[in-house]
């Protein structure tokens, strides 16, 4: 059982407390093993919104796996002389971190961490209104602007107010996996998890920002069996729809195919594991890749595409009969491969470029990756299905019909 201890300081903002508490409480309801505790230097703690909350004055026994969170409080023009915290309480914060625990803050709560010496030599953030003041008060800290949260050596700081929810979801994802974090976010109706100090938010939460029940059910099934081979027929059966309907609805909601979505989740989960000390080999096995070489290749390709800025570019959803390269996580049947038919769906450049087969076999009448992209684009105006061979033979005709500038 992991304890999540909230340190309540007079004048605290209710949402700074309630947002993370709701996230961890929802995770506990899902069986994740969180125990929420509330401590303070007085039993009755007034809030900035006029509601008094109750707190225990005795700290629970803390273990390294436990988490301490300091919600922010109302500040004046400056942080100074606000948020009274006794030296004994500051020693609790620094002592827990020294024993291997994680300490987090929301908004002005970063000031309490600074007074405890936890910001020295570390990156941190806080609400934009008090960032300059935090820089002056703790010159040894590196205050990062324009981000929602920063984590540095088990010291987690967030910008304030609603960003405490984003930080809590991230911490749940680290401990319990992104599948649980996605379920928590869905229960809280905050499907779109926002960035921390990373360029991309969680793929699992980023693609939950829709209202398609079929797509949500498919995502639930994929997330629950992240490391397993998942044929499209199985996912469709779990959703009670045909494969064609699943592919169409899933793509309309997320911009991805179900199997591409599984691959993105595997890559992200593997990244979490590697970031917390797992070897590439162990991470690959844990998320269902057959070997570490596949994981390394896919991670390298994802990084290259992010650097090129291709990750968010989408091609329109168009009807086509182009044989697209199978995703690395795909389990297409032999009939699917022989027929070479992919259902109507929305494709992104990252989907195509990161496909496990970057080039097609000319001997079977298929074409390379860029002719496929061109054929997809041309279908938008023609609105007629095309085969790869037809697209290749038609290309010179399109070029020759152009009038020179």
Image: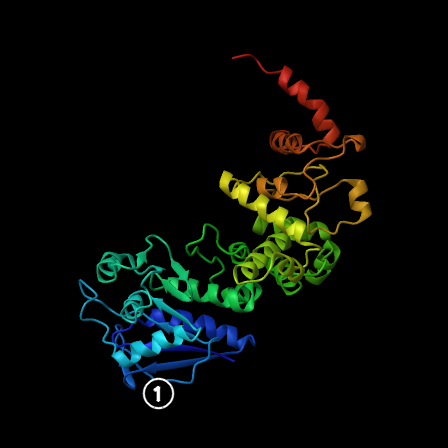
Is residue 139 visible to us here? yes
* Horizontal arrangement in the rendering, residue 345 relative to residue 51 (left or right): right
The residue carrying pointer 1 sits among few (fewer than 14), some (14 to 19) or many (20 or more) residues within 10 Å by Cα, namely few
Q: Quadrant of residue 50?
A: bottom left
Nearer to the camera, 306 or 96: 96
Q: Residue at x 42, y 73 (%)?
A: 21
Image point 81% across, 41% down: which residue?
338
Residue closer to the observer: 282 or 206: 282
Q: Position of residue 294 (x, y in %)?
A: 67, 50
| Side (left or right) of 181 relative to 396 | left
Image mark count: 1
* Way the structure is coloured: rainbow
Q: In the structure shown, which secondary structural element does the residue marked by tag 1 occupy?
A: loop
Image position, residue 140 (x, y; %)? 28, 59
- How far across and down, in percent of the image, does residue 383 sit? 64, 33
Tell me: residue 280, above or below residue 85: above
The answer to whether any part of residue 309 appears in the image is: no
> Residue 298, percent across and down?
62, 47
Residue labelled with disc 1 = 58
In front of the other: 329 or 205: 329
Examine the image and state in which quarter residue 99 appears.
bottom left
Q: Is residue 77 above or below residue 99?
A: above
Which residue is at a point 29% across and 86% down the rendered structure image?
A: 43
Left or right: 128 in relation to 148: left
In the picture, measured across the screen, residue 46 lies left or right of residue 363, that is: left
| Observer-nearest of 392 and 91 | 91
């Amino acid at each position: 059982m992991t304890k999540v201890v909230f340190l309540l300081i007079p004048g605290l903002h209710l949402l700074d407390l309630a947002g993370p508490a709701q996230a961890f409480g929802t995770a506990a309801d899902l069986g994740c093993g969180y125990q929420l505790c509330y401590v303070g230097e007085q039993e009755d703690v007034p809030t900035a919104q006029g509601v008094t909350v109750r707190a225990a004055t005795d700290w629970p026994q803390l273990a390294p796996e436990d988490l301490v969170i300091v919600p922010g409080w109302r500040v004046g023009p400056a942080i100074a002389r606000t948020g009274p915290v006794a030296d004994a309480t500051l020693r609790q914060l620094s002592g827990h971190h020294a024993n291997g625990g994680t300490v987090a803050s929301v908004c002005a709560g970063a000031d309490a961490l600074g007074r405890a010496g936890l910001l020295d030599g570390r990156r941190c953030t806080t609400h934009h209104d008090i960032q300059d003041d935090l820089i002056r008060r703790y010159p040894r800290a590196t205050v990062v602007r324009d981000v929602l949260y920063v984590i540095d050596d088990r010291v987690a700081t967030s910008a304030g107010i609603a960003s405490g929810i984003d930080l809590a979801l991230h911490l749940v994802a680290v401990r319990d996996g992104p599948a649980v974090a996605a379920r928590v976010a869905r229960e809280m109706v905050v499907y779109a998890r926002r960035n921390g100090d990373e360029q991309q938010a969680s793929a699992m939460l980023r693609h939950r920002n829709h209202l398609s029940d079929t797509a949500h059910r498919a995502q639930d099934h994929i997330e629950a069996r992240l490391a397993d081979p998942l044929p499209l027929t199985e996912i469709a059966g779990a959703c009670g729809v045909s494969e064609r309907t699943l592919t169409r609805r899933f793509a309309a909601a997320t911009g991805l195919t179900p199997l591409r979505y599984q691959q993105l989740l595997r890559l992200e989960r593997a990244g979490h594991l590697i970031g917390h000390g797992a070897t590439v080999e162990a991470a690959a096995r844990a998320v269902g890749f057959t070997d570490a070489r596949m994981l390394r290749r896919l991670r390298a390709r994802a990084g290259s595409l992010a650097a090129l800025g291709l990750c968010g570019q989408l091609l329109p959803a168009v009807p086509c009969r182009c044989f697209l390269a199978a995703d690395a996580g795909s389990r297409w049947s032999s009939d699917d491969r022989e027929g070479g038919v992919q259902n109507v769906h929305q494709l992104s450049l990252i989907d195509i470029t990161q496909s496990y087969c970057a080039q097609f076999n000319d001997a079977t009448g298929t074409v390379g990756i860029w002719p496929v992209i061109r054929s997809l684009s041309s279908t938008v105006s023609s609105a007629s299905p095309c085969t790869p061979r037809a697209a290749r033979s038609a290309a010179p005709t399109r070029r020759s019909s152009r009038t020179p500038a």
